[in-house]
Image (cartoon, rainbow, N blue to C red):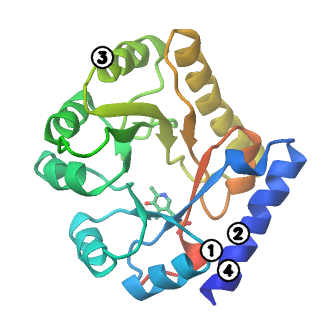
């Protein structure tokens, strides 16, 4: 049952917060509903879940139409081609997967005037993998780009996001998440005002929370396996 699974994940978050002396309210659970039905989202919503993350634009737009009466906060976490930015800017409150300046600029330009600025995170290719997009974790370059992005009018730069390479053990996971948290700290020391670290998924959310994650993105542990 989705409600039971959701409560289990919430307990895990609660446990991780307690262990590291963090207030429970400092971590947002993002339910990743890609490849799961609008009905599954409804069930999670009825169990008190309001933040949902989607990876595939057309699939997300269909579900948003079906769920238009629900007060859902939609997050886009998938890869972004330039020709998708308009629909993303029009239909999401958050975008976690901004991997270059061009995409940030387009999102700002295409954000409808009647909506508040769109919240974005810069995706960091934290393990420097050839297969992954995003910014490399190089302080100076990242600081320059982040400052440029904060000047864009219809965007609020909130923080950083990563999808680490699979790790063999908890120590390695923690080492990677710590590098994310140091990057965020450096940017803030450099005059930025970022409050978000989007990291941690079903398998590693406790390590992520120990390292300062403020949004954990959980799919499988809530909705079950995807097809
Ligand atoms: C699918 C996905 C998740 C959720 O992964 P699970 O292993 O199902 O918890 C989190 N973040 C991103 C970017 C994803 O694409």
Give x and y (percent) for residue 207.
74, 48
Could you say whether the residue bearing mark 3 is in a helix, strand or loop? helix
- Mark nearest the camera among 1 and 2 is 2
- Mark nearest the camera among 4 and 1 is 4
Among numbered discs 1 and 3, the one appearing first in the sequence: 3
Q: Quadrant of the N terminus?
A: bottom right
Check residue 5 in the rendering and tell me which mark sits there, or answer none: 4
Distance of mark 4 from mark 1, alpha carbons?
7 Å
Q: Quadrant of the C terminus?
A: bottom left
Query: Dots 4 and 1: beta carbons under 8 Å?
Result: yes
Distance of mark 3 from mark 2, alpha carbons?
37 Å
Could you say whether the residue bearing mark 2 is in a helix, strand or loop? helix
Q: Crowding near pointer 3: few (<14 within 10 Å), some, many (20+)?
A: few
> Is residue 221 found left or right of 55 in the rendered image?
right
Distance of mark 1 from mark 2, alpha carbons?
7 Å
Distance of mark 4 from mark 3, alpha carbons?
41 Å
Seen at 36% across and 12% down, the residue is: 144
Q: Is mark 1 within 8 Å of ligand 1?
A: yes
Reading the image, the residue beneath label 1 is: 221
């Amino acid at each position: 049952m989705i409600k039971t699974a959701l409560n289990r994940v919430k307990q895990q978050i609660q446990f991780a917060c307690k262990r590291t002396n963090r207030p429970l309210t400092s971590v947002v659970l993002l339910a990743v509903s890609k490849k799961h039905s609008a009905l599954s989202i409804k069930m999670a919503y009825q169990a008190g879940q309001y933040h949902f993350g989607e990876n595939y634009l057309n699939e997300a737009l269909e579900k948003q139409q079906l769920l238009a009466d629900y007060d859902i906060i939609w997050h886009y976490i998938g890869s972004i081609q330039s020709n998708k930015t308009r629909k993303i800017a029009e239909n999401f409150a958050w975008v976690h997967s901004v991997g270059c300046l061009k995409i940030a600029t387009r999102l700002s330009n295409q954000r409808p005037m009647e909506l508040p600025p769109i919240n974005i995170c810069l995706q960091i290719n934290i393990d420097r993998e050839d297969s992954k997009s995003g910014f490399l974790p190089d302080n100076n370059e990242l600081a320059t780009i982040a400052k440029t992005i904060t000047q864009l009018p219809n965007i609020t730069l909130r923080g950083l996001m990563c999808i680490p390479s699979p790790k063999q053990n908890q120590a390695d996971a923690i080492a990677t998440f710590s590098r994310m948290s140091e990057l965020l700290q450096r940017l803030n020391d450099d005059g930025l005002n970022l409050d978000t670290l989007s990291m941690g998924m079903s398998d590693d959310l406790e390590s992520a929370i120990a390292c300062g994650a403020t949004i954990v993105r959980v799919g499988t542990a809530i909705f079950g396996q995807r097809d």
